[in-house]
Amino acid sequence: MVKARKDVLLDPIILHHLVFRRVLEAISRPGTIMELPVAKTGEDCLLLILESLYDNNNTFAVISVEESYRKMWSENIKIRTRSLETSVEEADFVVFPDGKGKGMLSQVRRGNYLYPELGATVFFLIEGLSDNRGIPLKISGPGIKGESIIALNGIGKEDLEILQELNKEFPLGVESIFIDKGGRFLTLTRAVRVEIGA
């Protein structure tokens, strides 16, 4: 785990480096709940992760049930990352700030057999992450010792089924990052096998 002094976290370069390291740790240990040193809310956590992952070539899309909420998130992401917004089908990063796929999740990029890394990364801001509340998932695969049970509270079962479908032909698929309202997050990589309702 990355430890950080509070005074060092005032430097944005050091902060983004620490966040990036934390995200890499989460990717290497799918299903493990992580925290960021300075994120007090899910919104903070999501924006910090996006800032740490973006470069000048990345694009994003925001999907929300409420158009005003979508626009607010879109503007925040543009300001914080200086990146370009595009369609769901073309976006490198797709953000679902109300935890709902709204029928658009199935349209995200899965990469191709020559370039599987072109698959999108999807972000869901949800109510909570736990091992006993929400929809239970049994996960297994690289970075997970045997099998693990997690639960996601605030995402629909249909969206989890779409993620399962998107990732059924490894190495094609998407990376998923779930962030709760308290600023904790976990990842599920395309290589992880997910059993819903376990």
Image: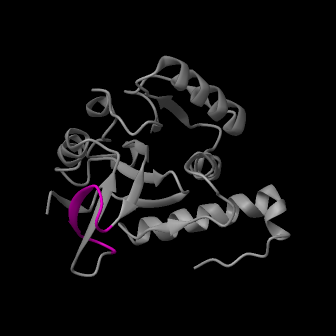
Magenta-drawn segment: 131-143
Query: In this view of the protein, which residue sits in the foreground, 148 or 121?
Result: 148
Q: In the image, what residue occupies the spot 51% across and 51% down?
A: 181
Whether the magenta-drawn stretch holds residue 142 is answered as yes
Q: In the image, what residue occupies the spot 36% across and 67% down?
A: 30
Query: In this view of the protein, which residue sits in the foreground, 59 or 130?
Result: 130
Q: Quadrant of the C terminus?
A: bottom left
Residue 136 x, y percent position in the rendering: 22, 60
Residue sitting at the far top: 67
Whether the magenta-drawn stretch holds residue 40 is answered as no
Residue sitting at the far front: 133
Residue 178 x, y percent position in the rendering: 42, 52
Q: Is residue 182 left or right of residue 152?
A: right
Q: Quadrant of the N terminus?
A: bottom right
Q: Is residue 96 left or right of residue 192?
A: right
Above or below residue 70? Residue 134 is below
